[in-house]
Amino acid sequence: AREARKRGADGVVCGHIHHAEMREIDGVLYCNDGDWVESLTALVEHADGRLEILDWSTRGHPGERVVPEDEAAIAPPGVRAPELAVLSAALP
């Protein structure tokens, strides 16, 4: 966080520290996505800019099936966008 602040960044994203968390350190948003092997967590950014840690171990699967609102925005004309499995988890 100190290096991010020194460079004028609003936040820093790290990974593979085995413990997922989001917190503010000296005015800098620190995000760590944990790891997929042991903690089964991931960091996602929603279309509205919100960041969220997904915890697969506590939320289970297959999750909610979602199709993007505007398929044309992500798929060429005539090609149907794939469904996405989305899990929703509350931040601690």
Image: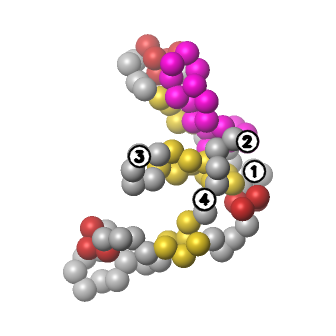
What amino acid does circle 1 point to? Ser
Q: Earlier in the sequence, mark 4 or mark 1?
A: 1
Q: Earlier in the sequence, mark 1 or mark 2?
A: 2
What amino acid does circle 4 point to? Ser
Judged by depth in the image, the label closer to the viewer, 4 or 1, is: 4
In magenta segment, residue 75: no
SS for dot 3: loop
Q: Residues within 10 Å of mark 4 (few under 14, many from 20)?
A: few
What amino acid does circle 2 point to? His
Q: Earlier in the sequence, mark 4 or mark 3?
A: 3
SS for dot 2: loop
- Count of labels shown? 4
In magenta segment, residue 25: yes
Q: Position of residue 46 (x, y in %)?
A: 45, 53
Judged by depth in the image, the label closer to the viewer, 1 or 3, is: 3
Judge whether 67 appears above or below 60 on screen.
Answer: below
SS for dot 4: loop
What amino acid does circle 3 point to? Gly
User: Which residue is tagged 2?
Assistant: 18
Residue range (magenta): 17-33
**Mark number displayed over residue 88:** 4
**Mark number displayed over residue 47:** none
State the residue in front, 36 or 50. 50
Judged by depth in the image, the label closer to the viewer, 4 or 2, is: 4
Q: Are marks 2 and 3 in contact (CB under 8 Å)?
A: no
Q: Earlier in the sequence, mark 2 or mark 3?
A: 2
SS for dot 1: loop
Q: Earlier in the sequence, mark 4 or mark 2?
A: 2
Q: Are marks 1 and 2 in contact (CB under 8 Å)?
A: yes
Q: CA distance from mark 4 to mark 3?
A: 15 Å
